[in-house]
Image (tube, rainbow, N blue to C red):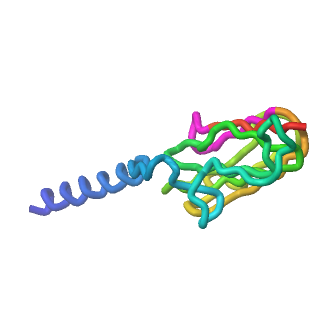
Amino acid sequence: MKTLLATICASLALGLVAAGCGGDDDDNGGDSGSAATTTEKPAETTGGGSGGAEAEASAKVSMKDIAFNPSNITVAKGGSVTWTNDDSVGHDVTKDSGPGPDFKSGDPGGIASGDAFTQKFDAPGSIKYVCTVHPGMEGTVTVTK
């Protein structure tokens, strides 16, 4: 009887761990996160781009389902990007390559669910960034002149 109970408890614990590592299947129409808790569109941009290039002064990226959404974003020189963790697991934002100074949001996985990180961009060009915790979770910020 003790062996059966131990087996059932171990199976339940393993099931909970596996469920916690999976992505959230709640679709919510695909627009389920943002850089501010009051906004619902992850790709919403604000500010005044100077026409043509569609570069904005600021942009928002959601971290959800082990992905950056959108993964490619354009901002004007001097603009900023805010990443918000709308996932159930920790993420980070770390510069991988490109112009300008290196940036890192903190410890690996240090942006907890609901937290955000903002980075200003002053050097024009294409900056690649990653989440160091999740291989393949990467994105690009293009900074216009």
Side of 43 where 49 appears, left or right: right
Q: Residue at x 67, y 40 (%)?
A: 130
Quarter-wise, where is residue 51 in the image? top right
Q: Which residues are magenta?
A: 126-137
Residue 69 x, y percent position in the rendering: 59, 44
Please report the residue visible at 67 percent of the width from the left and 53 percent of the height from the top. 83
In which quadrant is the C terminus drawn? top right
Q: Nearer the viewer, residue 141 or 103?
A: 141
**75 over 41 or under it: above or below:** above
Residue 100 on the magenta span: no
Left or right: residue 105 versus residue 1 is right
Question: Residue 52, can we see it?
Answer: yes
Residue at image location 60% in from the left, 56% down from the top: 34
Residue 85: where, in percent of width, then height? 59, 56
Q: Name the one closer to the observer, 114 or 144.
A: 144
Quadrant the N terminus occupies: bottom left
